[in-house]
Structure formats: C-alpha cells, structure tokens
Amino acid sequence: MFNIRFNVANRLKQLSISMAICLLGLIALLAISSTAITAYWFGENTYGEVINYQVSRERPANFTVSQRTPERHQIVVQYSVNNETYQILANSHVYSALNIINTGDRLLVAADKNNPAHGYVLSYALFSPIVSVSMPWLLVMLLILTPQWIYYLRK
C-alpha cells in the first residue's frame, strides 16, 4: 500500500513539474505576443487588404555563415480608419511563399485609437515561427496534462 501512495505522489510531482513548464512556456509566449494582444483588446479593429507582396534578399553582416542569401518576405496591408487610408509593412516570414497569405486577402488590423497610422496586423500566420509552432503544442500539452493532474491531485 505504501508503494501505491509513493507512485501516486511521484506521478503527481512529475505532472506538477510538466504543468509548471507548460504554464511558464505559455506565459513566455503570451509575453512575446503582448503587443498583438493589447492592440486587439484596446485598439480600433478593422480589416485590411494585402495589396503587395515583396521578397527582398539581404545579406546580414555577421549573422550567418551560410553562403545562401536569406530572403525576407514582407506584405503591405492597407486599411482604413475614419475614412482615412493607412498602410502597414509586415514581415510575413515564409507563409506568403507557401500561399497561406496572398495578395487580396483580408487580415484583421488593430490600430491605435489615438494614432490610427500605428496599426498591428493580427494574423496567426504573422506571429513569429516560434510562437506559431509552440503555442498550439503547449495548449495541447495543457489539455492532456490538466485532467491527469486533477485526477492525481484528488487521489
């Protein structure tokens, strides 16, 4: 009987550590996305249209040892607030090259209420690749770990 309780306590400890790691990762990713979140909650939300797609090749000085010149994929999103038109140049990573974001697509834009020229394009595909890949993984892990943690906590 002591062995069973030890296993339950040990399992609860392992699950607690896993939950803490997932929650810390989630908090870190939310901190990375804080600009987008505050823009969405407190800004003027409207839809903008992708009017241009650019690929520029830049050679950073000391950032890479590769001989291949890196590509920067950028989109220009045009949006209107109070009958005035504004444009945002946003880094689209490689999602534009994969045809996830195309010219003519409508994307959600959150603009500052006091300064509508300062806008933020809100699209899952425009978050950094780390956030785009890690956030769903962390959420799935929390969905898997939470019921197990509650089960062993109540045992």
Image: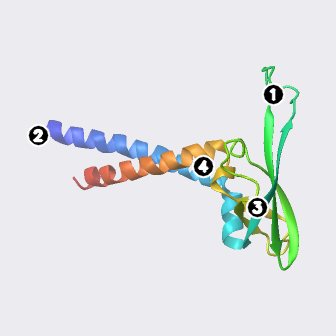
* Residue tagged 2: 1
Res. 63 mark: 1
Q: CA distance from mark 2 to mark 4?
A: 41 Å
Which residue type carries mark 4?
Ala
Rounded to the nearest whole Å, what is the CA distance between mark 2 and mark 1? 59 Å
What residue is disc 4 on? Answer: 28
> Which label sits in the foreground, 1 or 4?
1
Q: Quadrant of residue 38?
A: bottom right
Query: Considering depth in this image, is 48 or 149 the residue closer to the camera?
Result: 48
Q: Secondary structure at mark 1?
A: loop
Horizontal side of residue 120 vs 148, given as left or right:
right
Q: What amino acid is found at the position of numbered circle 1 in the picture?
A: Phe
- Dot 1 alpha-carbon crowd within 10 angstroms: few under 14, some 14 to 19, many 20 or more: few
Q: Compute the Cα span from label 3 to label 4.
A: 20 Å
Q: Do the CB atoms of the residues marked 2 and 4 lie less than 8 Å apart?
A: no
Query: Residue 57 or 154: which is nearer the viewer?
Result: 57
Name the residue tied to disc 3.
120
Percent position of residue 55, x then y: 82, 41
Residue at 74% in and 60% down: 121
The disc at residue 147 is none
Label 2: few (<14), some (14–19) or many (≥20) C-alpha neighbours in 10 Å: few
Q: In the drawing, does residue 150 fall left or right of residue 69?
A: left
Distance Cα–Cα, label 1 vs label 4: 25 Å
Q: Amino acid at mark 3?
A: Tyr
> Viewer-nearest of labels 3 and 1?
3
Position of 97 with respect to 63 (left or right) is left
Could you tell which of marks 3 and 4 lies nearer the N-terminus? Answer: 4
Q: What is the C-alpha distance between the residues marked 3 and 1? A: 27 Å
Which dot, 3 or 4, sits closer to the camera? 3
Q: Position of residue 53 (x, y in %)?
A: 81, 49
Image position, residue 105 (x, y; %):
71, 59
Residue 13, image x, y percentages = 34, 42
